[in-house]
Image (cartoon, helix red, strand yellow):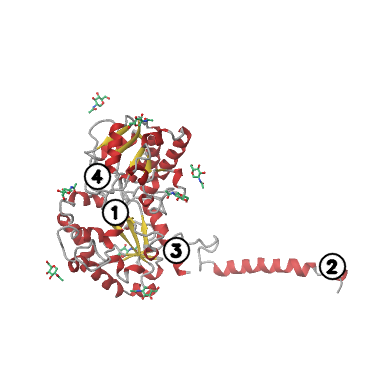
Amino acid sequence: MNMLMLKKSLVKHWFVIFISPFILCVSCLILSKYFMKGVSPTFHAPKKLDPCLGQYIYVYDLPSRFNDDLLKGCNTLIKWENMCPYLSNLGLGPKIIEESNETVISKKNWYATHQFSLEVIFHNIMKDYKCLTNDSSLASAIYVPYYAGLDVGRYLWGGFNISIRDESPNQLVKWLAQQSQWKRMYGKDHFMVGGRVGYDFRRGSDKDEDWGTKLMFLPEASNITILLIESCADKEFPLYENEFAIPYPTYFHPSNDDEIFEWQRKMRNRKREYLFSFVGAPRPNLTSSIRNELIDHCQSSKSCKLVGNHFGDPVHVLDVFQKSVFCLQPPGDSFTRRSTFDSILAGCIPVFFHPHSAYKQYMWHFPKNNSSYSVFIPETDVKRKRVMINETLFNVQESEVLEMRDEVIRLIPKIVYRYPSSRLETLDDAFDVAVKGVLQRIEEMKR
Ligand SMILES: *[C@@H]1O[C@H](CO)[C@@H](O)[C@H](O)[C@H]1NC(C)=O
Ligand SMILES: *[C@@H]1O[C@H](CO)[C@@H](O)[C@H](O)[C@H]1NC(C)=O
Ligand SMILES: *[C@@H]1O[C@H](CO)[C@@H](O)[C@H](O)[C@H]1NC(C)=O
Ligand SMILES: *[C@@H]1O[C@H](CO)[C@@H](O)[C@H](O)[C@H]1NC(C)=O
Ligand SMILES: *[C@@H]1O[C@H](CO)[C@@H](O)[C@H](O)[C@H]1NC(C)=O
Ligand SMILES: *[C@@H]1O[C@H](CO)[C@@H](O)[C@H](O)[C@H]1NC(C)=O
Ligand SMILES: *[C@@H]1O[C@H](CO)[C@@H](O)[C@H](O)[C@H]1NC(C)=O
Ligand SMILES: *[C@@H]1O[C@H](CO)[C@@H](O)[C@H](O)[C@H]1NC(C)=O
């Protein structure tokens, strides 16, 4: 058949080729509509996709020794501190009431939240997560609400031997491995949250004088995704790839989008009279610490505001941060600090001295571009007095400062944990970002 003939036959049979399938389709539709009537009321609209598809989470009902009993024994959780008030209000702590009328904080939803309360807050927000399911076969992820940090906190000081420290972690993994949900993916679709630093759960040896528990070295735990306020995971530790850092809890627990928008607006308009500030105590016994240098420098620099005590007073700390352009965030006992999140909340640009303080930590929550929201001054430069911090910060261009501050203020929703039982409409808070990260990681492992 040459082309001409093909064309001719196409013209001749156009009706058969184009129109008849159309008629067939239409009649099928009419027929099926007729037959389906009363059978499926949703037939007319295209079938709606389940908005929770791929986001269902199943929460284990753990034996109470792994969570509720710890709350009941709240006065024994930390040796020198009574945690009971801090664990009130669903783990948010006592409500903060501002005495002066400076309006440092907003009227609603500020709490004196403890830096190690995250596992309780996370659990309570999860109780109202929009895609919970009791059918674990439907779940994309399985949450293990174990309060690992509160648990180990009881035994970190006071010379407790390793069999005492490891008892709960051992019991927990034993319990998990017996669940039918475990067998599906050997725990690879499980996750938990630890409100302390990873180092507290990574004791490498069986010596009593070594720190922490070996929770995260137990074979079962290495299959579970673990979210912590500070991760040990790094390129140098590829074995720790199941660890992810998520923000420390701050004092603000908003219950709707508007409270956050209003707070952001307020932080944008704050007058900032100090070029930089430092809130924190020296570490006299830690020779590697740069805190002494920072404190000396701050004291001798007119443009720096030092808060050397009363740093436990949230209103005072936030007041100083709101009046500062830059906030120094050196390592303390570990690389990260809760103060980093307090400064972001106040619209104060963080200054880091170690890449592990932020850039290698909060991958899901912080921008990829570290200089878009922070300033970096290497620790060694401070130690060797090769840098004048006040001059470095003074020399940052005004336009760069404005851009960085905008970015910091844009981060606010992602670093707050909302009030449990509330839902945000258009914003993702720290909880939402973390859950998305977990779901995505598990999804990738399934493929
Ligand atoms: C609060 O503000 C009022 C007037 O605006 C002022 O008279 C009063 O001294 C302030 N109180 C405090 C505790 O700052
Ligand atoms: C799961 O079961 C518990 C206890 O029966 C019930 O209270 C809860 O509402 C159920 N949750 C969902 C998401 O169906
Ligand atoms: C650990 O300490 C507990 C309580 O002091 C004690 O009963 C137990 O025998 C100790 N275990 C070991 C292995 O030392
Ligand atoms: C961890 O997962 C692997 C599969 O990736 C499985 O072979 C192993 O048995 C699991 N470990 C435990 C303790 O379940
Ligand atoms: C530093 O070490 C000394 C001597 O060991 C001790 O008395 C002091 O309490 C320590 N200071 C701090 C802040 O830990
Ligand atoms: C900041 O990010 C850049 C690009 O990812 C990276 O090369 C650099 O090492 C980071 N800076 C620090 C101090 O980690
Ligand atoms: C990172 O942010 C800085 C400051 O906003 C900007 O100058 C730079 O171009 C950014 N780098 C990348 C790779 O986007
Ligand atoms: C920085 O601080 C030193 C004193 O530590 C002072 O001499 C210098 O003038 C300050 N520079 C700026 C830009 O404020």
x and y, in percent, of residue 441 in the image? 43, 63
Q: Amino acid at mark 1?
A: Leu
Q: Is residue 254 visible?
A: no
Q: Earlier in the sequence, mark 3 or mark 1?
A: 3
Q: Which numbered disc, 2 or 1, marks the residue that appears first in the sequence?
A: 2
Which amino acid type is marked by label 2? Lys
Instruction: Measure the alpha-carbon separation of dots 4 and 2.
Output: 81 Å
Confirm or deny contact between disc 2 and disc 3 (CB under 8 A).
no
User: What is the spatial separation of the Cα atoms under label 3 and label 1, in whole angstroms?
Assistant: 25 Å
- The amino acid on which the numbered mark 4 sits, given as a three-letter code, is Ala
* Disc nearest the viewer among 2 and 1: 1
Give the vertical position of 334 relative to 160 (above or below): above
Residue 62: x and y in percent read 26, 66
Position above or below: 348 against 133: above
Residue 277, can we see it?
yes
Q: CA distance from mark 2 to mark 3?
A: 50 Å
Q: Residue 54 — which label? A: 3
Between label 2 and label 3, give the one nearer the viewer: 3
Q: Earlier in the sequence, mark 4 or mark 3?
A: 3
Q: Nearer the viewer, mark 4 or mark 2?
A: 4
Quadrant of picture, ligand 8 = top left
The nearer-to-camera label among 4 and 3 is 4
Left or right, residue 56 beside residue 73: right
Q: CA distance from mark 2 to mark 1?
A: 73 Å
- In this rendering, which labeled residue sits more in front, label 3 or label 1? 1
Specify the label residue 107 is tagged with.
none
Q: Name which quarter of the figure residue 327 lies in.
A: top left
Q: Judging from the image, what secondary structure is the residue with disc 3 in? A: loop
User: According to the image, label 4 marks what residue?
Assistant: 112
Report the number of discs: 4
Q: Mark 4 packing: few (<14 Cα in 10 Å), some, or many (20+)?
A: many
Q: Which residue is mark 1?
A: 118
